[in-house]
Amino acid sequence: MGAQIRVLKRRIKSVTATKKITRAMEMIAASRIVKAQRKVAASAPYADELTNAVTAVAHSSDVKHPLTTEVERPRRAAVLLITSDRGLAGGYSSNAIKAGEHLTSELVSEGKEVDTYIVGRKGVAYYGFRERAITDSWTGFTDSPTYADAKMIAEPLIEAIERDTDKGGVDELHIVFTEFVSMMTQTPVERRMLPLTFEKSAEESAAVFAKGAQAHALYDFEPTAEKVLDALLPRYVESRIYNALLQAAASKHAATRRAMKSATDNAEELIKSLSRLANAARQAEITQEITEIVGGASALADATAGSDR
């Protein structure tokens, strides 16, 4: 019985130490979410205005730019998958990987070859374990990405879409990341970045087209509209990737906070359960000792009474 109590006390001590760790990780993740949200909010206006500018230039000229023109029969697509470098975030990375697998399956079913680009060690490990080809990968910055990281990622992707498909280029560029909706909701999303798509309502699209027409009436593009697109579109890709990295980072911290809170709550429940078992074992041990003492005293009294006769 004493051995059982010692085992339970060791388990209680171990779970208590684990609870302290998960509680600390929960608080750290909560503090990082606020910073990540601020970065997402700060990056959104630049990305939106840059998209409007690119859209206005594209619609105010008749230039057939490779980054804005649909290929009649696309044969190859690039998919950028954003995961995490670390675990302890519930199903965050696995959900993003599932979304990437779903998109890849759709593209393959359309007869397209897919080049996979991955951000985060979790995605790299997933594809590496299954011996799947990875065109390029980046790790080590998913918790706190910078614009320089987005620029580094965008460079080979822009080169791939500008290159002819016969020479290893691609006709489309897609991105898969986890969108931060709220502290409790983070949703994996699939979006096509290039050729440029317009994810706006009819009213918003009409306003953009009007803006483009107005820009065409007011300005001459120097040296040409095509050169302007050459300069703007890389910035567009970089800003969209940067915004996706920031949203993914915020989503990861939120998932970590939620997972650590669940772990902390489970640890508290386990400690209560183990404490009840330890108390029950201790009470049983005390009861057994009292029974043994009473039994011994009774036997001694009987023995003494027998000797007196």
Image (cartoon, rainbow, N blue to C red):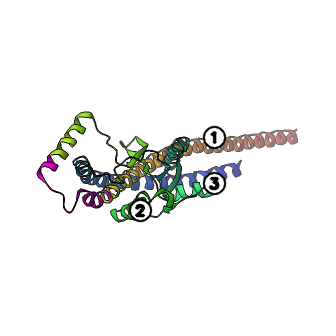
Q: Amino acid at mark 2?
A: Glu
Give the camera-side residue of 108 and 185.
108
- In the drawing, does residue 188 fall left or right of residue 3? left
Q: Residue furthest top?
A: 202
Residue at numbered disc 2:
159
Residues in magenta, as a range:
214-233
Q: Amino acid at mark 1?
A: Ala
Query: Do labels 1 and 3 touch, CB within 8 Å?
Result: no
Give the camera-side residue of 233 and 71.
71
On whether residue 230 falls in the magenta region, the answer is yes
Quadrant containing the C terminus is top right
Classed neighbour count for the residue bearing mark 1: other residues with Cα under 10 Å, few (<14), some (14–19), many (≥20): few
Disc 1 on helix, strand or loop? helix
Indicate which disc residue 280 carries.
1
* Quadrant assignment, res 186: top left
Classed neighbour count for the residue bearing mark 3: other residues with Cα under 10 Å, few (<14), some (14–19), many (≥20): few
On whether residue 199 falls in the magenta region, the answer is no
Query: Do labels 2 and 1 touch, CB within 8 Å?
Result: no
Q: Is residue 52 visible?
A: yes
Tell which circle, 2 or 3, labels the residue nearer the N-terminal end: 3
Q: Position of residue 209 (x, y in %)?
A: 21, 42
Q: Position of residue 48 (x, y in %)?
A: 26, 49
Disc 3 on helix, strand or loop? loop
Q: Amino acid at mark 3?
A: Arg
For the point 46% across and 54% down, which residue is it?
170
Tell me the CA gap for discs 2 and 1.
69 Å
Indicate which disc residue 130 carries.
3
- Depth check, mark 2 against mark 1: the one in front is 2
